[in-house]
Amino acid sequence: MTQARHRAVAALADPAVWPESGFWTQVHVLAARSLRTAFGDRRLVFFGLLQPVVLLLLFSQVFSGVGALPGVAAYQGYVNFLVPATLVNIAMTTAMSSGAGLLAEIFGGFTGRLRCLPISLFSVLVARTLADSARLGVQLVVTALASVVFLGFRPAGGVLGLGLALLLTLVVGWCLSWVFVAITTWLRKAETLQAASFVVMFPLMFSSSAYMPLDTMPAWVRAVSAVNPLTYAIDATRALALARPIGWSLAAALAIAAVAAAAGSSLAARTFRSHT
């Protein structure tokens, strides 16, 4: 009986019986797990989709007087100026939550258990960013539709222009998520991560062209905005959605996002592998 049991265990351990899964299979399984967690609670889904719509409504009303400024009047309403920027800011917020989600898995012991399995630890990070990007895509579509239906947003670029703007925002959000994942694997403390994320997020948001035309800002803020990567993403998103001249903002936004993703993924992979 003992020999038969040993033969059965050896057969189960045979790679021909249980072949090692490929990298993208691991990403698919882990991303699907994250998506089931994200969309499993209907109340969490509801408030997660409602939050950006409420923020957009508040900003569009509180700053409605900005619509009379020369740099905004050409957009035929402040809401048209604001919505593309809000889409990019949603991407920024969701990217920040990627780090928080990864941190929860680290301290929950999930990533530690994965070290016992024959899988690539980098697939854990890729799955996290892709799952959060899928969640971001849903948020962006819901926010854009709500803006058109309830706030009078009129994308002059039509469905194609708005679709390209959403796609650009999705790409930028995915690239930014690598930055916050890298910060998470480096700091590994919830309080420090939250403080660092807000230090990164709010200066980038409010020193960009998101809420006010750059011409109305002080000279030093305009100088900061010129090197702010969100400015280029927002300008490109506005140009696509509203059928305005793109210039080189689209190329700059994609280049900066690619550099951020490459640097973030490299740092995250190195620190995650050595500290998990």
Image (spheres, grey):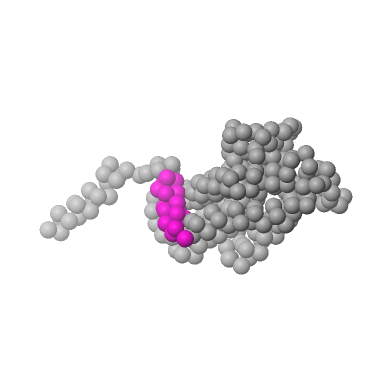
Question: What percent of the width, then of the height, locates residue 138?
Answer: 52, 47
201 in relation to 23, above or below: below
Quarter assignment of residue 255: top right
Residue at image coords 19%, 52%: 8
Residue at image coords 74%, 32%: 245
Which residue is most to the left?
1
Which residue is most to the bottom?
191
Range shown magenta: 26-43
Question: What percent of the width, then of the height, locates residue 61?
Answer: 70, 55
Q: Is the magenta stretch mostly helix, strand or loop?
A: helix
Q: How many labels does the image show?
A: 0
192 in relation to 80, above or below: below
Using the image as rendered, state which of residue 27 and residue 118 is in the foreground: 27
Q: State yes or no: residue 128 in magenta.
A: no
Residue 90 visible: yes
Using the image as rendered, state which of residue 120 and residue 161 is in the foreground: 161
Residue 136 visible: no
Specify whether 66 is left or right of 271: right
Specify whether 163 is left or right of 69: left
Quarter assignment of residue 248: top right
Residue at image coords 58%, 34%: 159
Residue at image coords 42%, 57%: 40
Quarter assignment of residue 253: top right
Question: What percent of the width, then of the height, locates residue 199?
Answer: 70, 60
Q: State yes or no: residue 28 in magenta.
A: yes
Question: What percent of the width, then of the height, locates residue 120?
Answer: 45, 48
Which residue is most to the right?
219
